[in-house]
Image (cartoon, helix red, strand yellow):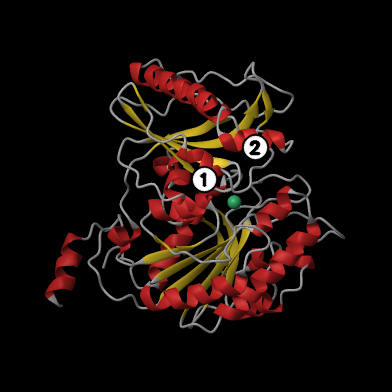
Amino acid sequence: MRKAVLDRFMKCNILKVKKREAMPVEKKVILVIVDGLGDRAVKDGKTPLQLAKKPTLDELAKKGSTGLMSAIGRGIIPGSDTAHLAIFGYEPQTYYKGRGPFEALGVGIDLREGDVAFRCNFATVDENLRVIDRRAGRLKDEGAELAKSLQGMEIEKTEVIFLPSTEHRGVLVLRGEGLSPSISDTDPHTSGNPPVLKSKPLKDTEEARRTARIVNEVVRKSNEILSSHPLNKKRKEEGKFPANIILTRGAGVYQKVESLKERYGFSSCCIAGSALYKGVAKYVGMEILKVPGATGRIDTDIEAKAKAAKEALRKFDLVFVHVKGTDNASHDGNLEEKLLMIEKVNRLAELLKDEDAYLIITADHSTPISIKRHSSDPVPVLIYGDKVRRDEVKSFDEVSVSSGCLGHITGVELMKIIVDLMGCGHMVGS
Ligand SMILES: [Zn+2]
């Protein structure tokens, strides 16, 4: 036995996945996660996947291994963030620290250990701080300009960082000593002109009280600064809602975790349009690729994504491709758009199926059109590639794959299967 292999073998704890040294993987992987793909019977007793035209996906199901997946566990309704964490192999129960840090990483902020991050909206309030519009009339490109005016704040010796995201969205990061993510949102989350909420400590600690105080001051100052911003004066003149305050939600603390490379020894990258998915990917150490045309919406350029994935395969061992439009269509209750997005996914599969890699296609969760929200219904999973077992399944849909040879797995189990396919797993015993 070669010394390096022997060393690794000797160090190997048989029940835990241990760090690996960098070695070439046996086979690369393209992991496509189609957001909110799973559904319930929506028309003639069929799900959108059963209704859609998707010859390539069906062909891959015929030639590959299929099954069902409940990303976090059966009967559990996953968020997109927690489901992705699980599929990347990180138990959400241990690794999920709130959505804010993912959004911050996703817009490109280099977080430091202990930073507390929030998702934010630019919103419109009246002089009594009642919320007229939580999205400031769905801001277009003005967010970047407005965000500049909020730079450089320091409150109670805490650095305040604010960066714009897409449309009316932004990210707030507090950096300094003695901060806590255990505080409530200032975003009232409802319509009907509710007042801006005061952030409150959710734990009886000085850190939580202090952080709530700082956030309330940031929100107050944002209102002061943005109210007199020339861009808002212009918006008012044009009869638009001024973006005159930021509202905070989803507080979370950043803690660095062991990367996929450190855990398993393979390199990885992410092709996605929306900040959240880039953020979760960055959290586990993936490199984020810029792909023009990857919008995170139904108009996403699937050909550009496929091209980027093919190129990325030359450099990376695992290429994660995210498709968001299916989830948007479901949240809007729009069957026609969901079918269109499934056809786009079919095209993506067609463009990627001949690569020298395993092609794995699944979803993070179901978003049934009939209820317009996430549900715990399991999602289909498909593994296509060299010498994988072929089951009897002939169609890639929620019902057909239930008799597939993968059975019913969790997200963490899927990553274990992927790690083994890549040749990066460890044997238990001898
Ligand atoms: Zn999702």
Residue at 71% x, 23% y is 193
How crowded pointer 2 is (Cα within 10 Å; few <14, some 14-19, many 20+) is rated as: few
Image height of 23 relative to 229, above or below: below
How crowded pointer 1 is (Cα within 10 Å; few <14, some 14-19, many 20+) is rated as: some
Report the disc number at residue 234: 2
Between 398 and 155, the one lying in front of the other is 155
Image height of 322 relative to 145, above or below: below
Residue flagged by tag 2: what amino acid is it? Lys
Which residue is under mark 1?
144
Image height of 74 relative to 318, above or below: above
Q: In what quadrant of the picture does the C terminus appear?
A: bottom left
Q: Which SS class for mark 1? A: helix
Whether residue 135 is visible: no
Where's residue 201, x and y in %? Answer: 45, 18
Where's residue 183, x and y in %? Answer: 46, 24
Task: Answer yes or no: disc 2 within 8 Å of ligand 1.
Answer: no
Where's residue 247, x and y in %? Answer: 56, 30
Using residue 114 as the reference point, say whether residue 242 is left or right of it. right
Using residue 148 as the reference point, say whether residue 428 is left or right of it. left
Point out the tag, 1 or 2, that comes first from the N-terminus. 1
Report the disc number at residue 71: none
